[in-house]
Image (cartoon, rainbow, N blue to C red):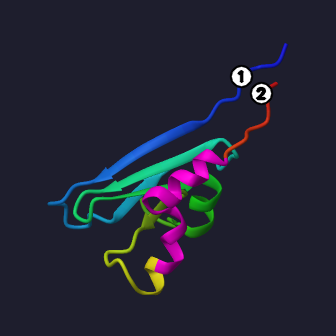
Amino acid sequence: MTRPQVGEFEVAAGARTAQHWNFFAALKFTPRENLYFIFYTERNNAIWTVPSRDVARISARNRAGKNIGKRAISFPKQPDGIKAARFAKYLDDRGFELLRGFRPRHLP
């Protein structure tokens, strides 16, 4: 008998009135194939779907302070520019396409 395939998700939102509405801090996780983050930024009504391995690669790791070892990620504020181009594959429908392509291995 094979075990079910499982995808795990963490969801975070940045409020329209927040000072740093595009910044998500104190992320603590172990990157793995079946973990995805879904970030929502209310101010620009954008959904960013990012595999945890990509979050680990593109985020900054805190090296000091109370959140040492945790990660932080900042999404583009503007819809164009270098940073927006770098994050385009995670935005809205393109990000959800990453989920559609997810094919986890069977759990032991």
Q: In this view, does 77 lie to the left or right of 29?
A: left
Q: Kindly identify the residue that appears in the image at 56 percent across and 47 percent down.
A: 36
Q: Does the magenta stretch include residue 52?
A: no
Is any part of residue 44 visible from this angle?
A: yes
Mark 2 highlights which residue?
Answer: 107
- Residue 89 point in image, percent of width and height: 54, 67
Looking at the image, residue 77 lies above or below residue 81:
above
Packing grade of label 2 (10 A; few <14, some 14-19, many >=20) is few
Of all residues, the one furthest to the top in this rendering is 1
Residue at disc 2, secondary structure: loop
Mark 1 highlights which residue?
Answer: 4
Looking at the image, residue 61 lies above or below residue 10:
below
Q: Kindly identify the residue that appears in the image at 50 percent across and 49 percent down.
A: 37
Q: What residue type is labelled 2?
A: Leu
**Measured Cα–Cα span from mark 1 to mark 2:** 7 Å
Which residues are drawn in magenta? Answer: 85-101
